[in-house]
Amino acid sequence: MITLYNTLTRSKELFVPIEEGKVKMYVCGPTVYNYIHIGNARPAISFDVVRRYFEYQGYDVNYVSNFTDVDDKLIRAANELGETVPEVADRFIEAYFEDTEALNCRRATANPRVMEHMDDIIDFIQVLIDKGYAYANQGDVYFRTRKFDGYGKLSQQSIDELKVGARIQQGELKEDALDFALWKAAKPDEIKWNSPWGEGRPGWHIECSVMARKHLGDTIDIHAGGSDLTFPHHENEIAQSEAHNDKSFAHYWLHNGFINIDNEKMSKSLGNFILVHDIIKEINPNVLRFFMISVHYRNPINYNLELVNAAKAGLERIQNAYQALIERQAIAVDVVSHHEVIDAINAILSKFEEAMDDDFNTANAVTSWYELAKLANVYNANTSTDLSVIERFLEVFGIMSDVLGVDLEADNGLLDDEVEALIAERQQARADKDFKRADEIRDLLKAQNIILEDTAQGVRFRRG
């Protein structure tokens, strides 16, 4: 049974779906005015793992993640680039897919865009006005925050606490400083749409409420995103959606922790703003994903090259154990003497599942993966191996790889068949007493971090 930490209740709860066997999940996506940064990559990876584990446990997951393609940042970027807002959005949506697919994130069931839902947004706002939860003023539309009973329940702040420091900015036409914009009157040279209140565009918060309802219904199982979205974005989503629908908006709220860069908050002013598009040119995206999941999704994570290299070394240990199993599979035989090893493999898989059942604890799940690799290495040291044991090892390695989304194929330059060909050439060179060529091949393999081992079955290799 899966338990998850619900930000709404500040406690772990047993997951009970609205509809048996199905999960309706909404994850706040990026504002597509630039390439995504490493902070955007964390929720993409974290909640991809959540989705994968639900699917592994047999759930049908309807996974929706939006693109914010209308926003002040997009308008500013379009002006700077001399392009239209849709052109900027299209370009960086394509870049988003390139980057997240490199990180082995599965595509969402749906990726709705704000510009595709403008009529739905206008209709949604009109209902809020009709019910007295919103009001128009000179082309702007605001939500009456105080009218919604329970505002602040997600961030656990009271109205009295929130009003301290709340101000009405110049040009805003609010009744109350706590009210927030649902629709913004058009400014000169901005992208705009017609509405009952005049030309304009939607506020940020209303967009997700509308797209979640459109694609998942009035009430959803899980709403997820970065912890920085808890307030005000997700708080405002709850207020709008529940005022509109007269129903609970989401049963469970999941939030991932922040990423720091060398123990400092990531920001452009500090010069440590890292784009995924750039980093995966230098760091294998498979390693970057493994690094991310090595920490529980709710905990903060500190990014630096030393820690990434440690993750790389850990992943290579797992990959090397897996590769050794593949090689041993070819010479394993059917025997019936190693059933206790299969029991040990199954026990490790149970520990892996227990970790994932406990609020998707990938850190502990990775520890189980290390245990599996260690057991595999010990077993592979035997002179004879049972084919059924090897196959069970490979099956469980595959389960963990699929759930965590980490590729088991090592990316170390030479492909396995190329290594085998070089080893054969080296053996022939030694037989022909062409020691110069044999040494050249040895040095080439060493440079690729490939270690040769003499065994009773001949020369084997492993990636060190």
Image: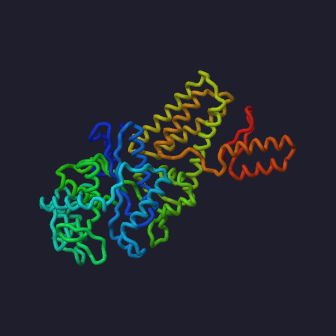
Left or right: residue 60 versus residue 152 is: right
* Residue 365 % position (x, y): 47, 42
Instruction: Please say if 75 is above or below 38.
Output: below
Quarter holding the N terminus? top left
Which residue is outermost to the right? 433
Instruction: Please say if 327 is above or below 385.
Output: below
Left or right: residue 190 versus residue 179 is: right
Left or right: residue 139 versus residue 257 is: left
Which residue is outermost to the top? 336
Instruction: Please say if 415 is above or below 244.
Output: above
Front-most of residues 113 and 263: 113
Q: How is the image coloured?
A: rainbow
Left or right: residue 99 versus residue 121 is: right
**Residue found 57% across the figure and 27% down from its top:** 388
* Residue 447 % position (x, y): 71, 53
Q: Quadrant of residue 143?
A: bottom left
* Residue 461 % position (x, y): 69, 42
Front-most of residues 97 and 448: 97
Instruction: Please say if 383 is above or below 291.
Output: above
* Residue 178 % position (x, y): 21, 67
**Residue found 45% across the figure and 73% down from its top:** 269
Query: Number of labelled discs?
Result: 0
Q: Quadrant of residue 96?
A: bottom left
